[in-house]
Amino acid sequence: MPVWRNWHDTARFNADGPGVTVLHESAELKVVLVALEPGQALPAHPGPAASFHFLDGHGVMVVGTDEVDVAAGTTVVVPPGQTRSVRATSRLAFLGNLGDPGSEDGPH
């Protein structure tokens, strides 16, 4: 059973682009830790059902045509096939939990 006691020790902030660390990947679930520097973004893309829990910083998440400001403590749940993107307005870190990562809308 993998355990991460401090996400700060695992997050990979990178000036060249988003830092994505895969914490778990199976046929049923993919868990990623994403680290973005200010101005960095994950482009809009469809994907499987997912939840995103923001650990630190501030940014904007777009789901379909809905845009929401996100900060530490925010959780966003996205239905399968829905387009999603994230843009950091400060250093931003979040966990993404993607269900059914092998579906035609995944993995992402």
Image (cartoon, rainbow, N blue to C red):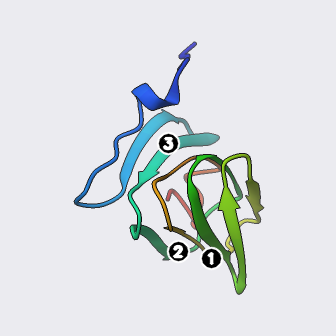
Q: Residues within 10 Å of mark 2 (few under 14, many from 20)?
A: some
* Residue at the image point whose x is 67% and y is 72% from the top: 81
Q: Which residue is mark 3?
A: 33
Write down the quadrant of residue 83 in the picture. Answer: bottom right
Closer to the camera, 18 or 25? 18
Image depth: mark 1 or mark 3 in front = 3
| Residue 45: mark in rendering | 2
Q: Which residue is mark 1?
A: 83
* SS at badge 1: loop
Q: Earlier in the sequence, mark 2 or mark 1?
A: 2
Going from the N terminus, do you reach mark 2 or mark 3 first?
A: 3
In the figure, residue 26 lies in which quadrant?
top right
Q: Are marks 2 and 1 in contact (CB under 8 Å)?
A: yes
Q: Amino acid at mark 2?
A: His
Q: Position of residue 50 (x, y in %)?
A: 69, 55
What is the spatial separation of the Cα atoms under label 2 and label 1, in whole angstroms? 5 Å
Residue type, label 3: Leu
Residue 49 lies left or right of residue 18; in this view the side is right
Q: Secondary structure at mark 2?
A: strand
Q: Secondary structure at mark 3?
A: strand
Above or below, 8 against 3 in this view is below
